[in-house]
Amino acid sequence: MLRPSLVVALLVLSVGPLGAGRWTPDGQQTPFAPPAITEGTFVLKSHTFRSGESLDNVKLHYRTLGAPKKDAQGIVRNAVLVMHGTGGAGSQFVGRNFAGELFGPGQLLDATKYFIVLPDGIGHGQSSKPSDGLHAKFPHYGYLDMVDLHHELLVNGLGVNHLRLVMGTSMGGMQTWVWGEQFPDFMDALMPLASVPTEISGRNRVWRRLIIDAIRNDPGWENGEYKTQPKSLRTVEQMIWLVGSNPALRYKAAPTLADADRVMEQAIANSLRNADANDILYQYESSKDYDPWPGLEKIKAPLIAVNTADDIVNPPEIGTLEEGIKHVKNGRAVMIPFSEKTAGHGTHTLAAVWKNYLEELLKASEK
């Protein structure tokens, strides 16, 4: 639920590689020089979340590449929204494995032709989040709220009244399904990556619940008012690291007990440097309202959903992607087999693995 408000956009131009996100494959997000990136913050003076809670001066950080182009009727025809996964940020898409495969001259989403928007979702990156000061008093947000705020950013912050493409990875993939239902006439095409169109359940819910309980049941959490990060944060980061890749890559990187301990310790030490327990708690609790299943028939735009068979988070044997896509009029589901090129859940950021399906989708949705 959105409330009309006065907004302010602050822009800073920056050029160069930015940091990788939590869900990118280990050791594969190598820096490179992407096209020029405009980085800014859109400030929403007041927002009421679907829970009824409200927040003033909501910061929505974003990065853009390219410029919007309007047709004779004033409709933006070249805008692309790319949404990140849980714990990530828009910065994860400017590395070699994503931007380097898609945003360069002559590539599928050439930044000289498209206006690419890479937002930091609420509770993530440089957007408003619990660690800014409100801690556990920060409004509880869900995926529907995140989509609402992305829509607000696009329409009132960036002047985008139509999207050529909506795509996202993991949580962003789930929000892509929601976009198709909430705003069915707003886009020409949809590409959810590493997601399924049903509520968080089964093992996916269990490992998320482990993270939530580890923080909430830790005496050191102190109801969100800790002065130092609670000890449970280490367990949380270990759990997140575990599900992000596939067993073959883990074994290749750590073929001995000592190697496994060393690789994990290095990964966790790195992730703990900037981790905050309240931010993570809110991020994982935000999936509570996700359930596009009842509204799949509302989706109008052509949609290609891409998952990989080695994804621990969304394993193929549960069958929910294949069953759900039957209810999407112009939908297609792709399950990429395990190979030396896939990286489990993190394959979503390896565009070389799946960009042929993006090409197919763009051609099928041309107008």
Image (tube, helix red, strand yellow):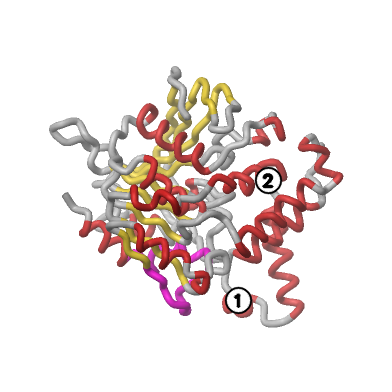
Amino acid on which the number 1 mark rests in the picture: Pro
Of callouts 2 and 1, the N-terminal one: 1
What residue lies at 16% left-to-right and 49% top-to-bottom? Answer: 367
Which residue type carries mark 2?
A: Leu
Task: Find residue 279 and report its horizontal and vertical position in percent.
Answer: 66, 42
From the viewer's side, name the closer residue of 113 and 283. 283
Residue 280, position as x, y percentages in the image: 66, 46
- The answer for how far apart the CA atoms under marks 2 and 1 are is 26 Å
Q: Nearer the viewer, residue 181 or 350?
A: 181
What is the number of callouts on the image? 2
Residue at image mark 1: 247
Residue 164 showing in the rendered view? yes
> In the image, what residue occupies the spot 70% across and 30% down?
137
Q: Which residue is mark 2?
A: 281
Residue 28 left/right relative to 223: left
Please state the horizontal and vertical placement of residue 169, each as a whole percent of the image.
46, 55
> In the image, which disc is placed on residue 213?
none
Secondary element at image label 1: helix
Give me the residue at 37% from left, 62% from top: 325
- The magenta stretch spans residue 340: yes
* Residue farthest toward the right in the current orientation of the protein: 219
User: Which quadrant holds residue 76?
Assistant: top left
33 is higher (above) or lower (below) than 155: below
**Left or right side of 116 for 146:** right
Q: Establish if 252 lies above or below 355.
A: below
How many residues crowd mark 1 within 10 Å: few (<14), some (14–19), many (20+)?
Answer: some
Q: Which residues are magenta?
A: 334-355
Q: Residue 335's spot in the image, x, y percent?
A: 41, 71
Q: Which tag is nearer the camera, tag 2 or tag 1?
A: 2
Front residue of 283 and 295: 295
Q: Residue furthest top?
A: 6
Q: Residue at x 70, y 57 (%)?
A: 237
